Amino acid sequence: MSRNRKAGVVTIIPDLSIIDIAEEGKGVGRADELVVFVEKAVPGDIADVRIVRKKKNFAEAVIDNLQKKSDLRTDPFCPHFGTCGGCKWQHMEYDAQLKFKHKNVEAALQRLAKIDTTGMEPILGSAENKYYRNKLEYTFSNKRWLDKSDMAERPDGLAPESPQPDLEMNALGFHVPLRFDKILDIQHCYLQAEPSNSIRNQVREYALKEGLSFYDLRNHEGNLRNLIIRTSSTGEVMVVVVFAYAEQEKIDGLMEYLKLSFSQISSLLYIINQKKNDTIFDQEVVTYAGRDYIFEEMDGLKFKIGAKSFYQTNSGQAHELYKITREFAGFTGDELVYDLYTGAGTIANFVAGSVKQVVGIEYVPTAIEDAKFNSELNGINNTIFYAGDMKDILTREFIAAHGKPDVVITDPPRAGMHADVVERLLEMEAEKIVYVSCNAATQARDLALLKEKYEVVRIKPVDMFPHTQHVENVVLLKLNSVN
């Protein structure tokens, strides 16, 4: 049994066995009746842990001394691991990651929806678990996150306290968790293939050399705000630089440098964002060189990707996800399909060749314009798209006008479906619902409501984001015969 010992105000739990991993990615141990969530712990570890936050029934802790390493542990491949907020599971073998993702989906469905998961299909791992993302967004900051190597040595040999003199404080990289104003300067990121790292590093080098000002996230000063890089399976590259205000000579200087330095860039864009938040969906996108979009390809179809477009960030695994969705639906060729939360119409256009008609609904108007363009681009004439809030669009009148669907595909955001949308699905009584989710907990909540008329007949998790706790899950529901 674990015992607590106190060192000043610090509580240490010695020899804590890590027995599981939580949905948010932390290791789980038990000390008497206390559940302890331990940062960067792996099931099978035995460690002395230091409590950093305590509530009545649980505590959060960090490893103070790793007594025994789990067999599931592996060496992190990224030098930024532990400080960067991404890839939090890279210290665990990939096969083990898949096992725990599968287990977490299973637990959510059992606990929250009381679903029998004995027939749940094995999780589909990602063929690529490095350089798998097609989009990354970096942030400029004049307040770089400092680590121990940046601090000056104290003459008394104690821990360093102040930054070294003449230290470069500008950074281009990712937010440090829980510190919105601090940016970790990234040298090499394993999430996106070249030329992503080269573009980011050369943009930083150019900006420092030319004296361009990096944004102050707290005081909202400085000009360089964000750098967005999108790549595609077709080999095309999009680069978007976000500035805080118009200094046209400096903007043109950086954009021309990128144009001349990287012939791979098919779409070179910039945005002037004078707001205090980083969202670009309400901002004008200016094309400096090339097109204002790139193309992605999947299953013989082309998809237009703009600066604001939504597209699954793991292109290869998205193809597998959509194939599973199509397989679960079991189309015969004569179905009317409703594709809810259609985004840029990727799933709608992907399944259109297998059905009679697809009706897509999405909240974001620009995404619907992309969906229509993608249908036209691929010569698809059996899709119809509507923009608006799902609960407001999907009414009895809408269904009467377009027909009762044979199959509903729904792929909502992490919050899941609005209760009114679930109620409408129960009223519609489509023969099949294929529910694609990036959040097993909210999916389980919705499935519990749909159980009134539907039976879950197939479940398959899909790993879209290796080295993170995130997982997609596809569920097939069939209408009960008594309805």
Image (cartoon, rainbow, N blue to C red):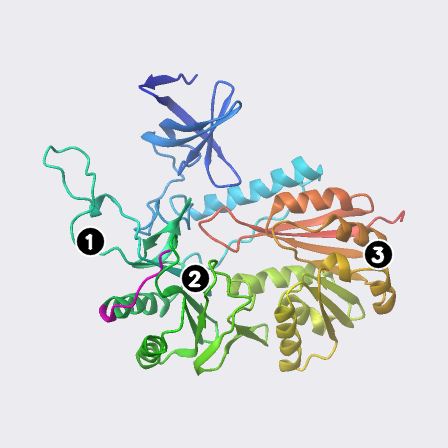
Viewer-closest of 34 and 167: 167
Give the label on residue 192, or none: none
State which mark lies toward you, 3 or 2. Answer: 2
- Element type at mark 3: helix
Decide whether residue 212 is among the magenta residues. Answer: yes
Tell me the kind of residue under disc 2: Glu
Q: Residue at x 40, y 25 (%)?
A: 16
Decide whether residue 146 is among the magenta residues. Answer: no
Q: Is residue 382 left or right of residue 364?
A: right
User: Is any part of residue 131 visible from this angle?
Assistant: no
Per the model, the C-alpha gap separating discs 3 and 1 is 63 Å
In the displayed image of the protein, which residue is found farthest to the left?
Answer: 155
Asked where in the image residue 311 lies, by quadrant, the reply is bottom right
Q: Earlier in the sequence, mark 2 or mark 1?
A: 2
Residue 310 locus on image (x, y percent): 56, 65
Contact, CB < 8 Å: mark 3 with mark 2?
Answer: no
- Disc 2 crowd, CA 10 A, few/some/many (<14, 14-19, 20+): some
Give the label on residue 167, or none: 1
Span shown in magenta: 209-216
Q: Is residue 162 left or right of residue 25?
A: left
- Disc 3 crowd, CA 10 A, few/some/many (<14, 14-19, 20+): some
Tell me the kind of residue under disc 1: Leu
The vertical placement of 159 against 247, above or below, is: above
Viewer-closest of 384 and 2: 384
Asked where in the image residue 196 lies, by quadrant, the reply is bottom left
Q: According to the image, label 3 marks what residue?
A: 428
Per the model, the C-alpha gap separating discs 2 and 1 is 25 Å
Q: According to the image, label 2 marks what residue?
A: 137
The vertical placement of 348 against 26, above or below, is: below
